[in-house]
Image (cartoon, helix red, strand yellow):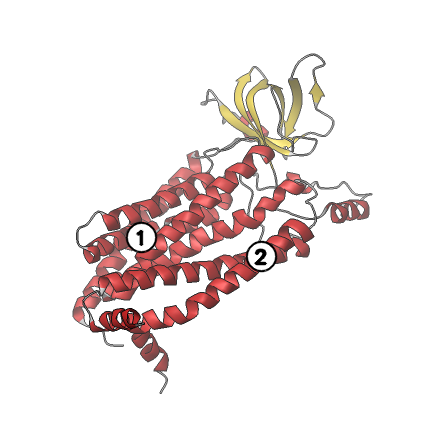
Amino acid sequence: MSNWIPLWLHKLGSPPTFYRFAGTLRPWAMALALLLGAVALYGGLVLAPADYQQGEAYRIIFIHVPSAWMSMFIYGVMGVAAFIALVWRIKLAEVVAMESAPIGAAFTFITLVTGSLWGKPMWGTWWTWDARLTSELVLLFLYLGVIGLYHAFEDRRQGARAAAFLAIIGIINVPIVHFSVNWWNTLHQGSTINLFGQSKISGDMLWPLLCMMLATKFYYVASLFRRVRTDLLALEGGKDWVRQIAESEAGQ
Amino acid sequence: MPMNPTRKRRLIIVALVVAAAAVAVGLGVYALQQNMNYLLTPSQVQSGQASSYKTFRLGGMVKAGSIQRSKDSLQVTFTVVDASGTMPVEYTGILPDLFRDDQSVIATGHMDNARFIATEVLAKHDETYMPKELKDAMAKAHANKKVEAGAAQGDMP
């Protein structure tokens, strides 16, 4: 049978299975995130050479760029989960979408703040209304809108559906953020890392950057799993599987 | 995979709403591309595109050797060039660290006859990151040719 993947996914979609699955993986993801993050910081702040143009100040790239990637990546995950939640009404998808929003908002905020700190010495300004900066700010507002809309409803599942709609429509902003530097004349420079074609960064600066990218991905998984587990317990409070967990923990 | 009718209906509704929003935003983006230019280049200014703006941003490369600093004030004059135009710029104030010959800059200000009087000068840097030694080695290798300063390439038209 070739449908073991859908079957496995179907099982994983049930709250008790996902609760156990996430509980097993979470510590590993967190450990990997911390390990890779430490390696990336050492590589970026100590081993990597200074830049020919920006000197030492460019090192904020090792925080700024991975955060910016995560701000878009998490929005993508949230959009897909929101779509599944709206069409198939899968509870787990709603929870994943809604619990991704605060993590994505945090990464977007870090991106904006580090970008601002970088912009002052290099460009000469904290902020300017160019297309890249503005669209990233809109991304933050979209995240905040999703979080706010979700909590504006008395019924959590109803709130999740309304917020999921906003999340899906807002996904249009993600390609705008990415391509803004190509579509308009901006103060922000173009992409350094290209999936297709040559990247414009030397290897000893590139590897800490990619290492930090992996670290932030693992951090997202660890953080999301923790939030989802908490949410599942709250949502399924009256169910048997939650009662069993509560009883086994009380008995210890 | 057979889909139950309710889910199919929801799928269609969600897809339609997203498609409609994407078309609306797409048209908006397309329209803004014409008139949401963050900056104008010297040749665009000379062809009269800046005539409708009181203040605007001028973007281009600082011509090598054109920077002249006043001895007793913060006044600086320099020339901004692009592929086919030049523009003299006057500015009084503190310049960013990256301001130098052959650097892409973006100046905000207004025209005064044929000169551009800037109230703010920002330095634009490119998307290339490399160690200084590598840059020097490359510069040496290109010593006989006119070196294209990496900083100047950006994505200016």
Which residue is more in the foreground, B34 or B47?
B34
Dot 1: chain letter: A
Q: Secondary structure at mark 2?
A: helix
Establish if A188 lies above or below A163.
Answer: above
Which residue is more in the foreground, A83 or A45?
A45
Q: Residue at x 21, y 58 (%)?
A: A157
Residue A133 percent location from the top left of the image:
46, 40
Residue B38 percent location from the top left of the image:
48, 33
Residue B37 percent location from the top left of the image:
47, 34
Establish if A57 lies above or below B85.
Answer: below
Label whose residue precedes the other's in the sequence (1 or 2): 2
Which residue is more in the foreground, B103 or A221?
A221
Residue to which mark 2 is pinned? A38
Residue B136 placement, left or right of A163: right
Q: Residues within 10 Å of mark 2 (few under 14, many from 20)?
A: some
Quadrant assignment for the N terminus of chain A: bottom left
Q: Residues within 10 Å of mark 1 (few under 14, many from 20)?
A: many
- Disc sitting over residue A175 in the figure: none
Question: Could you tell me the amino acid type at mark 2?
Answer: Ala
**Front position among marks 1 and 2:** 2
Question: Could you tell me the amino acid type at mark 1?
Answer: Ala
Q: Residue at x 29, y 64 (%)?
A: A93
Residue to which mark 1 is pinned? A167
